[in-house]
Amino acid sequence: MATPTLSLERIYDAPVEKVWRALTEPDQLKQWFFPMMADFKPAVGFTTQWDVTHNGRLYPHKIVVTEAIPNKRIAYTWQYVGYPGNSVVCFALEPLGDQTQLTLTHTITESFESERYPDFSNENFKQGWTHFVGSLQNFVEL
């Protein structure tokens, strides 16, 4: 099994059901994650794609849900269409009374060739996921 490229843990002042909805309901995902994401379903095999432009370059994001256990785990492949590389992103939830512990792992399963594409460096992935777990926290703790 591949070693996680990145693992982040956070404790949110929100019940696990609220965090799960933020991770899986399209109208909520658009508010803290990617507003251009057209749709999302927490169902194995569900696929969606959206475009992001960064540093003048187009990055078509594509995810395929690989695991969905309500109020516990949502995982999906994460890749950029037309670029090398693939990975798995997993959001694992643990209820802590009225709080929720989130563990995010981003595991590289096929090289993104960050030497050729510096935007795919481990540091950039860390910055991006750190931003998103903070954005999720702000959203669920409203």
Image: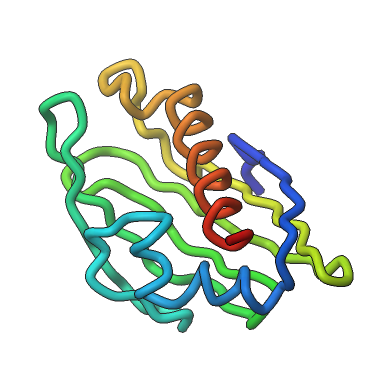
Q: Position of residue 3 (x, y in %)?
A: 66, 39
Question: Does 64 sit left or right of 52 as displayed?
Answer: right
Q: Is residue 2 above or below residue 140?
A: above
Question: Does 66 sit left or right of 95 as displayed?
Answer: left
Q: Is residue 105 above or below residue 140?
A: above
Q: Position of residue 54 (x, y in %)?
A: 21, 32
Q: Residue drawn 36% across and 74% down?
A: 26
User: Which image quadrant: the C terminus?
Assistant: bottom right
Between 23 and 116, the one lying in front of the other is 23
Residue extending farthest right: 97
Q: Residue drawn 22% across and 39% down?
A: 83
Residue extending farthest top: 115
Q: Quadrant of residue 53?
A: top left
Q: Is residue 90 above or below residue 114?
A: below
Q: Position of residue 109 (x, y in %)?
A: 49, 45
Question: Does 119 sit left or right of 101 as displayed?
Answer: left
